[in-house]
Amino acid sequence: MEADILITDTLLLPDPGNSTLIPSGCVAVHGEKIIYAGPMEHYNDRQAKRILDGRGMLTMPGLVNLHGHAPMTLFRGLADDLELADWLSNHIFPAETDHVNPEMVYWCSTLAAAEMILSGTTTTADGYFLETEVAHAFADAGLRAVVAQGIIDFPAPGVPDPKDNIEKAASFLDAWQGKNPLIKPALFAHSPYTCANTTLQKAKQLARRYNVQLYIHVAETEHEISMIQKPLGRTPIQHLQALGILDADTVCVHCVWADGRDMEILAGQGSPVVLCPQSNLKLVSGMADLPLMLAKGVRVGLGTDGCASNNSLDMFREMDVSAKVQKLHKLDPVAVPAKTILAMATTDGASISGFPGHAGVLAAGRPADIILLDVQQPHLAPFYTPDLLVYAASGADVRTVIINGRPVLEQGRLLSININKTLDRVRTMAIAVQ
Amino acid sequence: MEADILITDTLLLPDPGNSTLIPSGCVAVHGEKIIYAGPMEHYNDRQAKRILDGRGMLTMPGLVNLHGHAPMTLFRGLADDLELADWLSNHIFPAETDHVNPEMVYWCSTLAAAEMILSGTTTTADGYFLETEVAHAFADAGLRAVVAQGIIDFPAPGVPDPKDNIEKAASFLDAWQGKNPLIKPALFAHSPYTCANTTLQKAKQLARRYNVQLYIHVAETEHEISMIQKPLGRTPIQHLQALGILDADTVCVHCVWADGRDMEILAGQGSPVVLCPQSNLKLVSGMADLPLMLAKGVRVGLGTDGCASNNSLDMFREMDVSAKVQKLHKLDPVAVPAKTILAMATTDGASISGFPGHAGVLAAGRPADIILLDVQQPHLAPFYTPDLLVYAASGADVRTVIINGRPVLEQGRLLSININKTLDRVRTMAIAVQ
């Protein structure tokens, strides 16, 4: 079978969780899938419609950013150095009330897609309102994405009356279910402290009816713990469990304050967790106990959170901070080694995202989500092990990105997004925000 | 006076500690100095030998990286995820014994200079052995640098017998004192636990005789505290004070475990502190109490440490991690705002580095150490405030670097370093290390 794309003579990292580098590797892509990834000498068919010279490049699976609020690029850096409650109530919610509309959501999500593609993210999971516009933006950008319509018991963009939140979410699922192989619709219940019990249960019921994932912010701050635990006598995660909401399709975001018993519940239900350590640092939410989570058997992925609380969507940066902060947090330099973090951002993240066959590895039969990094730069020399991808690389090292067999970035040039038009549109909106 | 270089129509941040942006600014350079920095409309003389178009660029003072071990680029990523004692004794010291020689020091320091220039550092302070080769490398690269010859009571590269360590250091000062305006020689006593009291005192005596700075690792780990405090009944910083070593020219690196009284001593003596939070996280050393340090009146700068314990020399990354980690460490999102971190990496760092007139600002009469960043990229849009330089920018955004009036990087191209030759030499050495 002739390849559509053949990446030749590259430093190949087919499975980031196991650290094995193939010095002279190649990757062949046919249609949406990889048909070969391994040593170049074992691949005999050198014919291909397009050959990408991989010399000087490290080729690896694209990164998976499991939590974001793409339209919030408009609020990047608008309100820094504040606590979560102050930041949300006095800055972000008012800005959202004034400035979020379908056009804003489309263009600001396109900007987020550009930033993610440029920094090597090929799969993301997003949660916001007017999510149909996020889905359009990501579909146009060629990004693989779980797009989750927001549900909250407050007036929200596109859902002025909260009693319509489930119905609006159902319409969203109807519109996007099965429409585009790269866009997987889902639901995003904001949190146990902003959604009533019945809302949470209806959201989960709807998710089950459509067989889609439910994402939820949970156990993010100590304040949330006291808000839930004081009246109910149970932790937020126990609360979700009691409501019957936890299963393998409920993705719990943050879980900073999950204790050992909470983790056992999550592991028992197979509910994945997404950690966003940079956002948790910046908003002073706290730091999750990642080694304990892994020891308890919880499936864990990484996310940047929205770039208003980070302020970057660069997953390389998130990996670096995750690894370093956990070392000091646990007073153990080996508790979370670099390769564990790399696995969270690729294989584990891909598995949690739930796209059929998507495993975050470069192997025959897998979807062709591939990134190439320029490793000939001073800050990546010498290159002894892939640990350097965590501790020294950055999103700016990414040169070429292929998603589902389609090149979307080549030699640093975005192919699927008109970036000048996007920047113009977002900047015009930003003038009104300031 | 005709300018040699005129940067036109740029987004100007003349003093990073005060956050004021000038939307259409210009900077004029004559010889080694800035002759104008401010709004373009107030600068009438538009003639210049060279004009740099600053449109789409943010122009700011170059960053100051106050602690590094440049030759250790050879050991970048050689031994990750280890504790300081294990990392030093079982990995780094043996590798140094086998692989450090004058040629290695020159080329690996050139690599470090390239990485620093590419990521916007214009001034650095380095401490290592065979430091004369570091000085040659930095002088050739056109980097402004304090270069400090190492002093330790163990056999070291170039100083096989520790009883020669002061004499070798004196020869180094003789060789470099007053030789090159960009190279300021100094001494680097490794630590209070690797240098005897008499060694520390002789080192400080020598530094005073030559009127140069003395850098020293101190209060880096809890283990060091117990090593010094158990037998002596005083903290490492009290110990240095008792030995008469602390004054405004003794720069204390790390100070992770400095307590309130230690900080008062440092403030009282005017001894500056350099924090290296990424290295402290990665080696699980601990985290300094930066807000308390600042409240006590200590002068504080930032450094990356050697890239074997980081593993990056990108000061933008160091700023981001510094700001975020302090927030959670102090449970206070405003204790160390972004602009304080920016000041530490520019104005405060420049003042600590001690070059005459060097203030880390863009203003008439100041040395022309200037960097230009491309702020037209998706991850920097919108650009509401300079906080984004801390929370979203990275070294890869730097396009042009001028040090002491000399362009050393233009449009991403290194002018003062043959980077291909440098990479070749370092890679050849790395093969022997692996």
Image: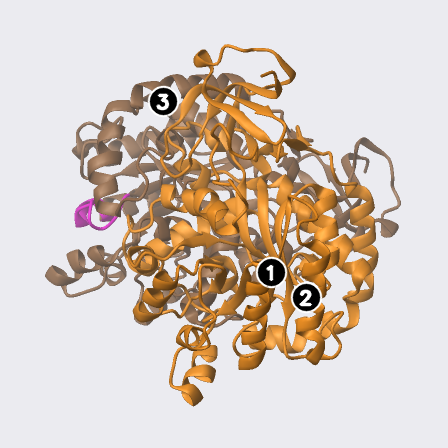
Chain colours: A orange, B brown
Q: Position of residue A305 (x, y in %)?
A: 56, 59
- The image quadrant that residue A149 belongs to is bottom right
Identity of the residue furthest to the front in this view: A209
Whether discs 3 and 2 lie on one chain: the answer is no
Identity of the residue furthest to the bottom in this view: A231
Q: Is residue B360 above or below residue A391?
A: below
Whether discs 3 and 1 lie on one chain: the answer is no
Q: Nearer the viewer, mark 3 or mark 1?
A: 1
Q: Residue type at mark 3: give it.
A: Ala
- Judged left or right of residue B88, residue B187 is right
Q: Identify the subunit bearing mark 1.
A: A
Measure how far apart labels 3 and 1 are at the Cα level: 55 Å
Q: Which mark is residue A210?
A: 1
Report which residue position mark 3 lands on.
B430
Q: Position of residue A104 (x, y in %)?
A: 78, 59
Residue at the image position 40 percent from the left and 78 percent from the top: A235
Q: Identify the subunit bearing mark 2.
A: A
Magenta residue check for B196: yes
Residue at the image position 48 percent from the left and 14 percent from the top: A43
Report which residue position mark 2 lands on.
A170
Q: Are marks 2 and 1 in contact (CB under 8 Å)?
A: yes
Q: Residue type at mark 1: give it.
A: Tyr
Q: Nearer the viewer, mark 3 or mark 2?
A: 2
Which range of residues does the magenta coloring cover?
B190-200
- The image quadrant that residue A398 belongs to is top right
Q: Identify the subunit bearing mark 3.
A: B
Q: Give the camera-side residue of A7 and A367.
A: A367
Q: Is residue B355 visible?
A: no
Residue at the image position 45 percent from the left and 59 percent from the top: A248
- Judged left or right of residue B295, residue B51 is right
Dot 3 lies on which element?
Answer: helix
